[in-house]
Amino acid sequence: MSAESDWLDSSNGRGLLQEESDQVERALESVFGDYLVQIGSWGPQDLFLKHSRTRHKVLLGWNQADSPDALVCADSLGVASDSVDVVLLPHVLETVSDPIAVLREVDRILRPEGHIVVLGFNPVSWWGFRHRVSRNGYPPETKRHIPERRMSDWLRLLNCTISYASRYYPVAQAGRSPSGQQQTVIQKWRNWKAFNPGYILVACKELFTLTLVRPSSRRRTSLVGGLVNPTTRNVA
């Protein structure tokens, strides 16, 4: 097992996966279509896919151990252009070498009026601090934490409109319910949205319609009237 898988199986990891599963379920409540594609594995294979309301759902990954439906490169998915209704990115942009290249590939395969669902980590949080001081990142194998504002800007550059945004504070699953005092502390942290470690964004790809503009009518010059009458000469 990888360091990431080991961490996701810890109390903090299980708490994060449960919270994110609930967040994705709410985000997908009104998102329909033919195809949903999840890029990259994060937790159990059906953790997010089970909430999909599309007719078909596919998991694409680059690690055979995660049992994806197809092995791909993150920036070269091998999917037809304008063919996908929903793309789910669970912390993928924080683990790949070139997040911009991945977003361009997502934009290519997404249909107009399709949706992108992004799960990200907030660098201005306790988890963000742990990431900066950890040798292997936090959670392990994470290369970067991307601010929500920057992520929103990237999506807008792809002509996407942010339709839903939320921050969340996952609670570690320690095998027992938190005490009353612990619940008070947890609720206090949840109320400080700016410092919550996780966020979710849903963006809709804009549909551009072509409007035919007719050329302004011009008075046509009469071909015959426009000719110069020849001069008649008498030749001696």
Image (tube, grey):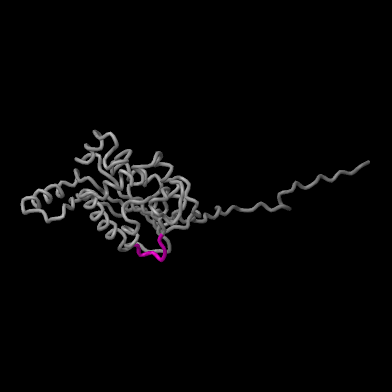
Q: Position of residue 184 (x, y in %)?
A: 8, 51
Q: Position of residue 35 (x, y in %)?
A: 42, 61
Q: Please, is residue 106 above or below residue 47 in the view?
A: above
Residue nearer the viewer, 172 or 92: 172
Measuring 49% from the left and 56% from the top, which residue is drawn there?
211
Residue with the most extreme left position: 181
**Horizontal placement of 190 versus 222: left or right?**
left
Give the overall secondary structure of the magenta segment: loop
Residue nearer the viewer, 11 or 166: 11
Residue nearer the viewer, 67 or 196: 67
Q: Position of residue 107 (x, y in %)?
A: 43, 49
Q: Please, is residue 203 above or below residue 125 in the view?
A: below
Residue with the most extreme right position: 236
Q: How many dots with numbers?
A: 0
Residue nearer the viewer, 199 or 137: 137
Residue with the most extreme bottom position: 55
**Horizontal placement of 68 versus 225: left or right?**
left
Q: Quadrant of residue 49?
A: bottom left
Q: Please, is residue 161 above or below residue 32 in the view?
A: above
Where are the magenta residues, as a range? 52-57
Q: Position of residue 19 (x, y in %)?
A: 23, 54
State the quadrant of the C terminus.
Answer: top right
Measuring 35% from the left and 57% from the top, which residue is drawn there?
45
**Horizontal placement of 10 versus 187: left or right?**
right
Task: Give yes or no for residue 49 being in the magenta stretch.
Answer: no
Measuring 25% from the left and 39% from the top, which residue is drawn there?
123
